Amino acid sequence: MQKSPDHTLVTPSAPVATATHGWRAKCLQRLVRLDLPVPTTVALSFASVRAIAAGQPAPGKAILASFGAAPLVSIRPSPENPDWGGPGTILNIGLNAERHRTLAESHGHEVADALYLRFVQAYALHVARLDADLFEDIEADGPEALARALSLYEAEAEEPFPQDPRAQLAGVLRSMARAWEGTSARLLRQAKGAPADAGLGLVVQQMIPGLGNGECGSGVLQLVDPVTGLRQITGRYLSQSQGRDALGAGAEALYLERDRRGPSLQDLAPEAFDKIKTFAALMREKLREEMQVEFVVQNGDVHILDGVRVPRSSRAAVRIAVRLAEDGIIAREDAVMRVEPNTLTELLHRQIAPDAQRDILGTGIAASPGAATGKLVFSAAEAQASAARGEPCVLARRETEPEDIRGMHAAAAVLTERGGMTSHAAVIGRGLGLPCIVGASSMDFRLDKEQIVARDGRVLRAGDTITIDGTRGQILAGAPAMVEAALDDAFQTLLGWADAARDIGIRANADTPEDAQTARNFNAQGIGLCRTEHMFFEPARLIVMREMIFAETPGDRAAVLERLLPMQRQDFVQLFRIMEGQPVCIRLFDPPLHEFLPTSRVGQRALAEALNLPVSDVTRRVAEMAEYNPMLGLRGVRLGVTVPEIYDMQARAIFEATLEASREGDPVVPEVMIPLVSAKREVELVKARIDAVAAAVQAEKGRSFTYRLGVMVETPRAALRAGEIAPHVSFLSFGTNDLTQMTYGLSRDDAGRFMSTYVQQGVFSEDPFRILDIDGVGELLKLGMERGRRTHPGVTVSICGEHGGNPESIAFCRSTGFDYVSCSPFRVPVARLAAAQLAITHKIGRS
């Protein structure tokens, strides 16, 4: 005979744990320990629920024995993490024809009919799995609706509605257990970070009907606003005696003062209201968390059904954590640990400028706040390919599925034709802090043609630029002006605490003064990568660059570059002044020169005219400079060796800017980085010329300065030969973007076409361009660091690829002994918080 699955009466000393019974069961036990008025509760463990799902009999009779005679009970899910969801709650189990008659006699037929009807509908949909439309569209009221529902159930299920409470309970337990094990449920919770074998507990609780002659009703209350995180009593209360929502949602004034809709809960039952507030404050203090109290008032008495962590926006999460620490309820380090680093991105999202012109194409549900502009793409693979090319995109889908998550990670925003606030796209979008609009039914999605037709007839195609305003739910044409997100005191306070805890440096990748100012605003500890080639694509500079490319002799090239010198010098002066003495690492020119030449005949004719050359000369020069694989061709340090005049000019611009910027502030110590190194001799040749330029500038200006020279380790050979390179430099900065490409032999511009397939089939555990490959690329980083420090113990080691802002990558760099990571400016707060959490976790592990 099979043993019936175990169940546990929740008492102060019962063996209930989050790891075995789930978060809800453990929370209810804590409320019982606080001597709060919690109804009788029974918890089923993960193992018991798995056994029920596998076919073992559900212990309906044994569980009901804990509740006395003829009880009504509810069942709620209790996974280990509340974010993993679970089956919906089922209420009023045990309600049958006999209980219906009793309720009708004590509280009237209207109440009894409504309760029984809702239970029949819930049981039909979730346990018997009958057609929802049949039961949701019953065109009748009162006893006629109930009779119709019972008749439909018997016809569709081919058996009468179950009257035995034990059979009802067993059916609900079995249904919820199997629902958790279903494929869709497993995919959804895995998308939220749950392991594949995550367990589900179930909580069976005595129902408090909230019916009587005195004030009766039910609701929820919390002491903070879940959107803003500010102190503000909010919630909802449905008064049975008043027959209406007596509280609504809003400020404390709604509870304390009479409004146009009638009396508040405080008016109706002031003692109950005060008790609920007291219970909420006690839970906040003892459970060390802002809690949402679910309660029932029956004849003025308060019963606490549940206490859950207040659902909160990212902004509220920061404010709540900081306030709990400031009130002495939790430690500052605990506050730092309570905010998920990636959720800070929601606080950092830009918004559309208030005065910007809005060319509205359509509207939908504003599912996740913030605004983003990008090119329209229609698949997750296209989104990943776009991200690999460094092009922001907007991912448009009819509705997203779990397999679209990688595309959502890669996109700047998401737009779906279907869905609501709890749809997959909305939930994942908010989790990622990704601007998102769902339910854009005002637009016609023609996905087979990769087109969207706006409500005014305009046709949007793949590659068109649109803007998603996830705050207002508007889809806009083009790229309207944006404003940066405003960060409040709580945000700054939390990151200040994080900075006090972390033990690895955080810098920013910044190519422009605007980027540098953003980095400074986010308290980056300097610039870890400034890509100077981006400065040459401005029209006034581009023609000079092209003229230099056509110069025949070193002297001619140097003469042309002399015209670029003041422009470059001013670029660097701006960066140095913005960073106010913080280190600025400037990467010397990296891309192949052919990128600066026109490829079209029209462009080549225009260039010939600008340079006063025959078109044939321009065409020939463009052909001569073409490369089969330019990313592995004449670029980086190879240009510095073969066309040294470029680096000579840049070095002079850096050093002259150093002296100029140092006049008005803290002394500047620039860092000069040589890209794409693979051999020691390359470093020796370039270093000799840069040192010579530095000596010349110091002699000409009559002033001395200090600078640091380093290399960008982007080739596997440079990592392997770091031991012979390190003695010649002050720092080794690993460029993980190119290093990943060369280690894998993958083009990040093309890998998106098959990356999803590779990850889905287990070839790669993650996209290595998004998450640092610890086993392969990581081993090269570790070898390079170890070999470099073996020959130069004081050499600074860092990474400056896009991986630098990823918490998992920061964890590897910190454990390996890197000095700092550098990431895009808007990832700096995420990196600061992630680094702090790693340090705190390490500290806890040692204690």
Image: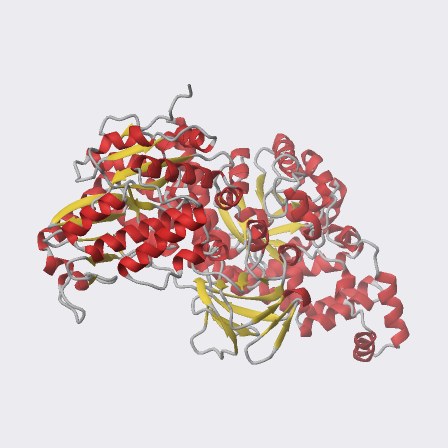
Question: Quadrant of residue 417 in the image?
Answer: bottom right
Q: Residue at x 15, y 58 (%)?
A: 241
Q: Is residue 627 above or below residue 842?
A: below
Of 637 and 619, nearer the camera is: 619
Is residue 173 among the parts visible in the rendering?
yes
Q: Is residue 161 above or below residue 425?
A: above
User: Which residue appears farthest toward the top when viewing the image?
Assistant: 1
In the picture, measured across the screen, residue 781 lies left or right of residue 826, that is right
x and y, in percent, of residue 434 in the image: 49, 58
In the picture, measured across the screen, residue 485 lies left or right of residue 561, that is left
Q: Residue at x 61, y 58 (%)?
A: 655
Of 3 and 318, nearer the camera is: 3
Is residue 735 among the parts visible in the rendering?
no
x and y, in percent, of residue 819 in the image: 53, 40
x and y, in percent, of residue 264 in the image: 15, 62
In the picture, measured across the screen, residue 254 lies left or right of residue 53, that is left
Q: Is residue 522 above or below residue 835?
A: below
x and y, in percent, of residue 207 in the image: 23, 43
Quadrant, the C terminus: top left
Quadrant, the N terminus: top left
The colour scheme of the drawn protein is secondary structure
Of 832 and 427, nearer the camera is: 427
Q: Residue at x 42, y 40 (%)?
A: 175
Total numbered labels placed on residues in the image = 0
Of 211 and 117, nearer the camera is: 117
Q: Residue at x 56, y 36 (%)?
A: 794
